[in-house]
Amino acid sequence: MIPEEGQTVERKESLSLWRDIVETCAAFATAQGGKVFVGVADDGRITGVQIGKGTLEDLANRIAQNTAPRIVPAITVEREQGLAVIIVAVPEHQTKPVTAFGRPYRRSGRTNQVLQASEVAELYLASRGLTWDETVKPEASLSDIDPEKVRKYLSRAIAERQWPIDPQTPVQQALNQLDLIRNGQLTVAALLLFGQKPQHFLV
């Protein structure tokens, strides 16, 4: 028996709706995964699909070629009432959001929602274990850091936290010790704390 449509289930009557299928796969991958049943009408009627040589491979390729990060679902065929039903099982993707045809989707109830820019940014950072202030600003350099602000902070850290560091420690070394440089680039936190004009990079 085909389950009802919902957060993790979608029914599609025909393979001609392959673009909708791709979008649903992206939406499932961005959420908690799910299954698309192809050959089933919205009301639950089994319509079946014609399966020929290369049918499943073609569907898999359409999904993989039109999603990013690329989705490679498990595709199987089951018989319902003597008719073939294709089941596309999509796991949750670790990297989010997943796009279809260049647009980011996420499953919400029985619908696929196109994400807003703020939602995309939030998901992107969360799936990579980063917060906004930990992201880098490649266009910023050490010349954008106020050395006096760094020295004052170090002096305060020594006085209040007994942090064993020389207030005259070079700026780059101090920022590295504070974990405010990632892969040689300044983080948003570094600019917020010590930037000469942080608003230049954060507006």
Image (cartoon, grey):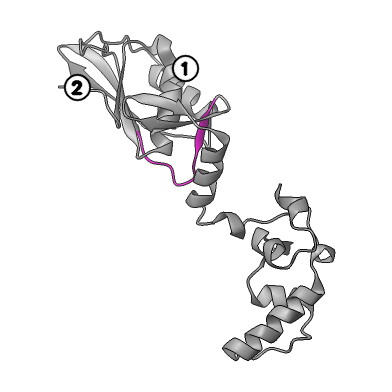
User: Looking at this view, is 52 or 137 the one in front?
Assistant: 137
Residue 142 falls left or right of residue 46: right
Residue at numbered disc 2: 2
Is label 1 in contact with label 2 (beta carbons under 8 Å)? no
Q: CA distance from mark 1 to mark 2?
A: 22 Å
Residue at screen point 41% across, 21% down: 21
User: Looking at this view, is 46 or 202 the one in front?
Assistant: 202
Residue 43 falls left or right of residue 106: left
SS majority, magenta:
loop
Find the magenta span and give its range.
90-100
Using the image, tell me which numbered label, if any, was put on residue 19.
1
Question: For the residue marked with disc 2, what is the amino acid?
Answer: Ile
Visible residue check, residue 182 = no
Q: Residues within 10 Å of mark 2 (few under 14, many from 20)?
A: some
Could you tell me which quadrant the N terminus lies in?
top left
Image coordinates of residue 34 in percent, x first then y, are 32, 33
Q: Secondary structure at mark 1?
A: helix
Q: Residues within 10 Å of mark 1 (few under 14, many from 20)?
A: some
Picture quadrant where residue 77 is located: top left
Q: Is residue 99 magenta?
A: yes
Residue 142 falls left or right of residue 163: right
**Which mark sits nearer the N-terminus, 1 or 2?**
2
Question: For the residue marked with disc 1, what is the amino acid?
Answer: Arg
Image height check: is 136 above or below 97?
A: below
Q: Secondary structure at mark 2?
A: loop
